[in-house]
Image (cartoon, helix red, strand yellow):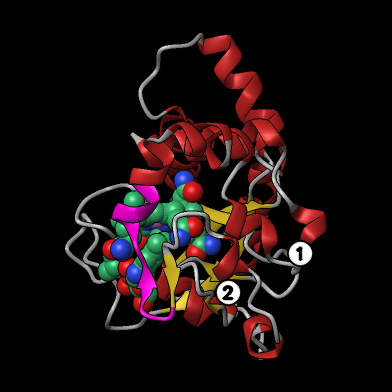
Amino acid sequence: MTDSSDTLENIRAALAPHGLFLRGVLHVDGEGPEMASGHSARTVVLIGNVGGSLWPAFSRWRDEKGVGLDHPLDVWSEAVIRPLAASVSGEAWFPSETPWKPFQQWAMRAEGLKASPLGILIHPVHGLWHGYRGAIGFSERIGDATVPFDHHPCDHCPDKSCMPACPAGAITSTGFGYAACRGYLASDEGQSGCMAAGCLSRAACPVGAGSRYPVEQLRFHMQALSL
Ligand code: B12
């Protein structure tokens, strides 16, 4: 019989060749999403990338599949995570699936992350260079809950250089202005600026600079944002 710490180790080992990580274990007893079985989930295991970790495995897969696939990163994530979830008797969930599951709230609770002025969560080690590719829900308690970080890099950042770095003025104290960002990305200046080199605000953040995405990945995410 497999105990729940083996389950987590099996998940970690299966994700590693794909450059994905078990990011957090959250016990959501009584408040988890309803599972296909009709039970409410009791554990959510968050899966994601840190830095450019997924890019080599994802790029190889995409080269094999050929170009022209819609939302290839979502398709790849499902191809990796869905069979893994089935193998550990869990249920796979994805960030782009509607109705949207609260991935950021889960990450805030499991890892102790908080929002940066950009809207995306900042990680004390990897800064803005991380994301979530899926989650596995379980109808029972699995493993120990992740110990959350207890400090938030933006609290100690005197300059907030991310905010003035946005050429569209989309990062303000009242939140992220998607329309301004999108309009700028469509302009000639935006095409040769953020679209070519990645979001300038994200790049201006000094936290986790060593985890910065490779330029191909930056471009890929910008193209997805401007679709
Ligand atoms: C819709 C969406 C967007 C929309 C609108 C966001 C919004 N106003 O809510 C748009 C298209 C603008 C967007 C943009 C981006 N997004 Co987005 N987005 C989502 C998505 C699919 C749903 C968000 C949601 O409503 N969830 C439902 C509620 C119930 O979940 P929640 O956790 O309780 O909600 C949180 C968010 O709504 C958040 N929030 C509120 N306002 C904003 C604004 C922005 C810009 C963001 C990102 C989040 C955010 O606050 C809540 C936390 O309490 C999530 C995936 C997901 N399932 O959550 C990704 C997600 C939030 N996005 C993500 C990312 C990385 C981006 C981009 C950087 C992508 C890119 N290509 O560059 C940009 C950000 C631009 C920037 N500022 O730098 C990541 C964030 C990871 C992280 N480190 O936190 C997520 C989790 C997807 C993932 N695969 O990891 N996004």
Q: Is the residue marked by circle 1 packed among few (<14), some (14-19), or many (20+) residues within 10 Å?
A: some
Front residue of this view, candidates 187 and 105: 187
Q: Is residue 168 left or right of residue 131?
A: left
Q: Which residue in the protein does label 1 denote?
A: 208
Q: Residue at x 71, y 30 (%)?
A: 56
Q: Residue at x 33, y 44 (%)?
A: 183
Query: For the residues marked 1 and 2, what is the alpha-carbon distance in whole angstroms?
Result: 28 Å
**SS of the residue under disc 1:** loop
What mark, if any, has residue 143 been given in the picture? 2
Mark 1 CB lies closer than 8 A to ligand 1: no
Q: Residue at x 69, y 45 (%)?
A: 213
Which quadrant is the C terminus positioned in? Answer: top left
Please give the range of residues in magenta: 173-182
Q: Residue at x 40, y 45 (%)?
A: 184
**SS of the residue under disc 2:** loop
Quadrant of ligand 1 in image:
bottom left
Residue 177 in the image, given as x and y percentages of width and height = 34, 62
The answer to whether any part of residue 6 appears in the image is yes
Q: Amino acid at mark 1?
A: Gly
Front residue of this view, candidates 122 and 80: 122
Residue 209 in the image, given as x and y percentages of width and height = 79, 59
As drawn, 24 above or below 226:
below
Q: Is the residue marked by circle 2 packed among few (<14), some (14-19), or many (20+) residues within 10 Å?
A: some
